[in-house]
Image (tube, rainbow, N blue to C red):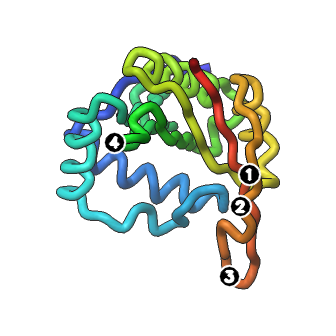
Amino acid sequence: MPQIEICQAVPEDAAEFLAYTKRVGSQSDNLTFGAEGLPISVEQAHAFLQAMNEERSSALFCARADGVLVGTANINGFPRRMCHRAELAISVDQSYWGCGIGTMLMNKLIAYAKENGVELLNLEVRKDNAAAIHLYQKFGFQMIGVFPAFFKIGEEYIDFLLMALDLR
């Protein structure tokens, strides 16, 4: 098992982050993007990571296995009357599924949320993504609804579960 390190992403991670999104996007249909990765430039990714580091209730964390980016997790806080809430997302390189990286990233996200005054976390997950659903339930996330036809891949519509965790 490689040495896994979890750290907050910095703007200098922009190019590596974009390459990672292309890699994981080609491995699974569970993400909002495919093999094309995120449709932004390195400069835009740099600005995004800078902004994430400046927001109190938002952050992006990287999981590195022996220095190689193999997972990401982000928490995005909401503004104004929703500032007690945040949305989160996790992705892990398929080669590292089942190695506990999702659990490590989830621990980091929840700790960050608590430290920064976030009281409610929510996420969306493919209805058929049993491994991710199990991870979220392990941390106490509850299903609060179903979003029909959340994704459309080709001609197939895919429902998602809406899940929430109350940290109060």
Q: Are marks 2 and 1 in contact (CB under 8 Å)?
A: yes
Element carrying mark 3: loop
**Which kind of residue does numbered mark 1 sit on?**
Leu
Q: Comparing marks 3 and 2, which lies closer to the viewer?
A: 2
Q: Distance from label 2 to label 4 (Cα)?
A: 25 Å
**Which kind of residue does numbered mark 2 sit on?**
Phe
User: Position of 95 compared to 10: left or right?
Assistant: right
Mark positioned earlier in the residue sequence (1 or 3): 3
Query: Is residue 54 at all visible to an observer of this figure?
Result: yes
The residue at which mark 4 appears reads as: 80
Name the residue at the bottom extreme.
155
- Which label was assigned to residue 154? 3
Residue 122 coordinates in the image, percent (x, y): 59, 40
Residue 24 coordinates in the image, percent (x, y): 54, 53
User: Position of 138 compared to 1: left or right?
Assistant: right
Residue in the picture at 34% in, 27% down:
8
The residue at which mark 1 appears reads as: 161
Q: Which of 92 and 136 is in front in this view?
A: 136
Relative height, residue 131 to residue 37 (above, below):
above
Residue 47 coordinates in the image, percent (x, y): 19, 50
Q: Comparing marks 4 and 3, which lies closer to the viewer?
A: 4
Element carrying mark 4: helix
Q: Distance from label 3 to label 2 (Cα)?
A: 18 Å
Mark 1 closeness class: few <14, some 14–19, many ≥20 residues within 10 Å: many
- Quadrant placement of the N terminus: top right
Q: Comparing marks 4 and 1, which lies closer to the viewer?
A: 4
Q: Nearer the viewer, residue 63 or 51?
A: 51
The residue at which mark 2 appears reads as: 147
Name the residue at the front extreme.
81
Q: Distance from label 4 to label 3 (Cα)?
A: 37 Å
Residue in the picture at 70% in, 31% down:
141
